[in-house]
């Protein structure tokens, strides 16, 4: 007998929720075949079979909270050879898979939607783990969604969200709108572990840090001109588009090296100064905000930064981000400008001591050389922990970021 245990889930993650069992007791499995999905407060994790065999028992049912190292179930002796034929048998596979994928659950939104019948294409368009959980929660089959946007046509979370946003037939509306004791027009939805953790950490930051925000504005004229001049050649050589985020990452790295307190953190009665920059990039995903980390950002080129950020964005949408990729950040950048935000006060990402907020670029009348000119301007904000970062350091840091973005030559020359 082999035990199926909860694996190490990443830095500071000690518990998870059993989201969905992919196999049932008595089924044969091959070595490394996915058995169960665990939902943590950051991402969804698949647990694979430690060896080939047959599932003897399931110790933690769906919805149960488990700790790292806890028992999920047991595997008995067996070759696991029968696992492959199940996928290969065209007639038997859909019949066995249908109850697992389409088992209806009570939901507030409509279940019957246009887009297909039974999940005959479930095998060819197999959903990614995060998408599969959302589909199970809403009683949706892979056949209803069809081909997904992820690799090999697999269904991603974004595909499920898009499907849910489609208007449902009028006949389905009365059945889906069940009466609720809370009153007409209200709906109660249980918070995900990710949303609960976001709420807890943001409130923790407000309660713990002496948080203060300082503002400045950046003239984007030169950066926009530089980007316009070289964007085609940049994309042709590096295979990725040149965005403004790389300008701000490079400018922040230079400023953090000059003002190390903004890149430090408090540990008890000590200040931990870091001689590297692990830059967190806030990315909005289907389940909420996550912050993947660009490790050793001081060593990355403009192209390296753009490639990493593009990869993060895609994998966040597909639910494929790994736990270790969100740990160990020393400073964070968040860009509310992509949603149209003109100005905001970003909240620290504990235990970090600084976070930069970017905002929308707007043309404004500015006085330049004694004349009024129309310039593309962006407000930037630095929220910082006043316990270790003084006001002078914070303001000077933001000025350095402003100078670096307005004149990229300073970044190349180390000025």
Image (cartoon, helix red, strand yellow):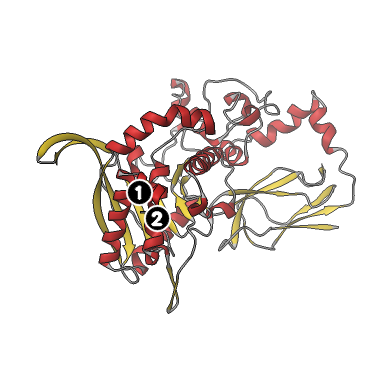
Q: Which quadrant holds residue 152?
A: top right
Name the residue tied to disc 1: 410
Quadrant containing the C terminus is bottom left
**Total number of numbered labels?**
2
Quadrant containing the N terminus is bottom right
The local secondary structure at tag 2 comes to: helix
Q: Position of residue 396 (x, y in %)?
A: 28, 60
Q: Position of residue 75 (x, y in %)?
A: 82, 53
Label drawn at residue 230: none
Name the residue tied to disc 2: 254
Q: Can residue 233 be seen in the rendering of this structure?
A: yes
Q: Please say if 282 is above or below 162.
A: below
Q: Position of residue 30 (x, y in %)?
A: 82, 43
Q: Residue at x 47, y 58 (%)?
A: 277
Residue sitting farthest toward the front? 413
Contact, CB < 8 Å: mark 2 with mark 1?
A: yes
């Amino acid at each position: 007998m082999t035990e199926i245990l909860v694996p190490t889930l990443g830095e500071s993650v000690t518990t998870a929720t059993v989201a969905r069992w992919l196999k049932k007791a008595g089924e044969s499995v091959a070595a490394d075949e996915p058995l169960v999905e665990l939902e943590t407060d950051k991402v969804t994790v698949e647990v694979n079979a430690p060896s080939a065999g047959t599932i003897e028992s399931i110790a933690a049912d769906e919805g149960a909270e488990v700790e790292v190292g806890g028992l999920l179930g047991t595997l008995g002796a067996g070759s696991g050879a029968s696992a492959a034929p199940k996928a290969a048998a065209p007639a038997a596979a859909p019949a066995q898979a249908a109850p697992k994928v389409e088992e209806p659950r009570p939901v507030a939104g409509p279940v019957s939607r246009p887009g297909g019948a039974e999940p005959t294409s479930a095998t060819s368009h197999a959903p990614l783990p995060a998408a599969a959980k959302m589909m199970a929660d809403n009683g949706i089959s892979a056949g209803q969604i069809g081909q997904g946007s992820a690799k090999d046509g697999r269904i991603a979370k974004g595909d499920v969200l898009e499907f849910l946003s489609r208007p449902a037939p009028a006949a389905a509306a009365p059945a889906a709108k069940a009466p609720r004791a809370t009153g007409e027009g209200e709906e109660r939805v249980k918070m995900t572990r990710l949303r609960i953790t976001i709420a807890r950490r943001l409130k923790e930051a407000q309660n713990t840090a002496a948080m203060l925000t300082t503002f400045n504005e950046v003239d984007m004229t030169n950066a926009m001109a530089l980007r316009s001049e070289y964007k085609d050649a940049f994309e042709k050589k590096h295979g990725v588009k040149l965005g403004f985020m790389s300008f701000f990452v490079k400018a922040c790295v230079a400023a953090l090296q000059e003002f190390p307190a903004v890149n430090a953190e408090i540990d008890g009665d000590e200040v931990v100064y870091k001689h590297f920059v692990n830059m967190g990039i806030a990315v909005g995903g289907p389940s909420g905000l996550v912050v993947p980390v660009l490790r050793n950002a001081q060593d990355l080129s403009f192209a390296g930064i753009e490639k990493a950020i593009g990869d993060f964005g895609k994998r966040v949408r597909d639910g494929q981000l790994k736990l270790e990729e969100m740990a160990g950040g020393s400073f964070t950048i968040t860009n509310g400008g992509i949603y149209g935000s003109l100005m905001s006060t970003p909240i620290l990402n504990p235990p970090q001591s600084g976070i930069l907020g970017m905002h929308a670029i707007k043309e404004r009348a500015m006085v330049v050389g004694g004349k009024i000119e129309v310039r593309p301007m962006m407000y930037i904000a630095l929220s910082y922990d006043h316990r270790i970062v003084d006001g002078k350091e914070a303001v000077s840091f933001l000025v350095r970021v402003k100078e670096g973005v307005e004149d990229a030559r300073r970044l190349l020359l180390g000025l």
